[in-house]
Amino acid sequence: MTIRLIDTHCHLDSESFHQEIDQVVQRANDAGVEKILAIGITVETTQAAILLSNRYPCVLAMAGIHPNHTHEAKPDDWERIEDLAAHPHVIGVGETGLDKYWDFAPLEIQRDYFFRHIELSRKLKKPFAVHCREAEPEVLDVLRTAAGEEGHLNGLMHAFCGNSETAKTCLELGLYLSFGGMLTYKKNDSLREIARTIPLDRLLVETDAPYLAPQPWRGKRNEPAYVAETNRVLAEVHGLSPEEMANITTSNAKRLFRLP
């Protein structure tokens, strides 16, 4: 069985890739990665992600302003994100969310942009990706408010590392949970136990490259090819083969992002 993977979250425009971007993409393809989602965290990185999607057929883009960059946004940046998000190679909105670990942007500014991203997601019928760091109660509050009476959202929790209650609420709201390299860390049994409880039809895998490399490369630069290792561990957690899990997460990603 041929392995088929989608890296649902990668900062492919990172300077650390500039000198060997062709080789990075080729290694991903050789590892069975058929699509790489390049994530925008500012207007400029969103533009860079779109340029990469023009250059490499396997690359698609997402448009957004990361919560830690919301305080830096210029007056017309949000309008530019709205325009960029409508580009045909842009298949999602974000990453957005809340971050209380880094003391960069006031929480109210982050919340404002979080709601903007969710509304843009609705308008364009493209899913949104949520960043959450040490802000689970606050993120869930925004998500519940945004879901309203409908009670359903179209998006994913990126690099999920929350607790079981957060996972349960996200699933109830209709979100997918994406797992990255942290799932593979030797002492992260609690995260693997939570991953074991997630329904197969809500699982996604990602790298968040160049950050958070999985165990064999921990502490080194991450890259899209390494999503295969996270997929392998996720498969082990669910008692499946890597090929079976790859087919499941790839089918989920295609359904969420409306890919052929």
Image (cartoon, rainbow, N blue to C red):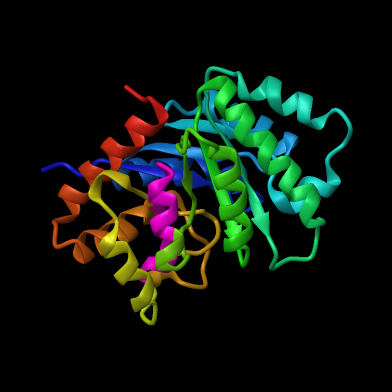
Counting every numbered tag in the picture gives 0
Q: Position of residue 46 (x, y in %)?
A: 66, 34
Residue 11 visible at all = no
Left or right: 13 in relation to 111: left
Residues in magenta?
167-184
Left or right: 248 in relation to 84: left
The image quadrant where one finds the N terminus is: top left
Magenta span contains residue 179: yes
Q: Position of residue 16 (x, y in %)?
A: 61, 54
| Residue at 51% in and 64% down | 212
The image quadrant where one finds the C terminus is: top left
Left or right: 213 in relation to 144: left
Asked if residue 141 is positioned above or below residue 25 in the image, the reply reads: below
Depth order, front residue of 221/96: 96
Q: Position of residue 171 (x, y in %)?
A: 38, 49
| Residue at 56% in and 26% down | 122
Left or right: 15 in relation to 122: right
Asked if residue 20 is positioned above or below residue 210 in the image, the reply reads: above
Where, by quadrant of the figure, is residue 249 drawn?
Answer: top left
Q: Position of residue 235 (x, y in %)?
A: 21, 59
Q: Which residue of the protein is positioned furthest toward the bottom in this rendering?
A: 187
Q: Which residue of the protein is positioned furthest toward the left in this rendering?
A: 1
Q: Which residue of the protein is positioned furthest toward the front in this rendering?
A: 149
| Residue at 51% in and 53% down | 208
| Residue at 46% in and 61% down | 166
Asked if residue 183 is positioned above or below residue 87 in the image, the reply reads: below
Where, by quadrant of the figure, is residue 229 drawn?
Answer: bottom left
Depth order, front residue of 12/94: 94
